[in-house]
Amino acid sequence: MTKKVFVLNGPNLNLLGTREPGIYGVTTLEGISEACKQEAEQLGLEIDFRQSNYEGDLVSWIQEAGAENAFVLINPAAYTHTSVALQDAIRAAQVTVIEVHLSNIHAREPFRQHSYVSPVAKGVIFGLGAQGYLLGLRALAAFATEEQNNGHKR
């Protein structure tokens, strides 16, 4: 059985490639999506790649992932630093989450160094650009194998 992964992207990530390329790189969100699809196929994962500028969409998608017993790879973008709602959704949905950031959030402004998502994430990847998404998918594939071998869903 193929494990599903929701790859969720927060506000302004639709502008990747043109938005502050010195910080976020030149890869577009479409480019990241294509790389994730290829990686997922090789790993035996099914991905559902989404982006929204609206916090409520992300909350609903996390809940949907929980209902489907899917994993979540999330770049919450600016909501990282502000959204108790995302943290609450992750807790309520009981999903396995990997948090990913293109930039090194700990080398940036002090307000960007706090994450509401990290305390409820299984792991956090930051500062590795678009490669962070692929590393997150590899980790989730390993967790899926572990689940399958242990005979339980979560």
Image (cartoon, rainbow, N blue to C red):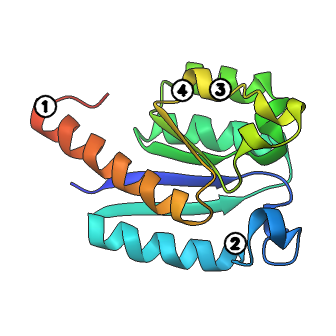
Q: How many marks?
A: 4
Q: Which mark is residue 93?
A: 4
What amino acid does circle 2 point to? Leu
Image spot of residue 146 (x, y percent): 19, 38
Q: Between label 2 and label 3, give the one nearer the viewer.
A: 2
Q: CA distance from mark 2 to mark 3?
A: 24 Å
Specify which label sits upstream in the sequence, 3 or 1.
3
Q: Which residue is mark 1?
A: 151
Looking at the rendered structure, which numbered label has been put on residue 89?
3
Separation of residues labelled 3 and 1 (CA atoms): 25 Å
Mark 2 highlights which residue?
29
Q: CA distance from mark 2 to mark 1?
A: 35 Å
Tell me the element at label 3. helix
How far across and how far down the image is residue 148, in percent? 16, 40
In three-dimensional space, the C-alpha distance between marks 4 and 1, rounded to whole angstroms, equals 20 Å
Q: Nearer the viewer, mark 2 or mark 4?
A: 2
- Quadrant, the N terminus: bottom left
Residue that appears at 77% across and 25% down: 85
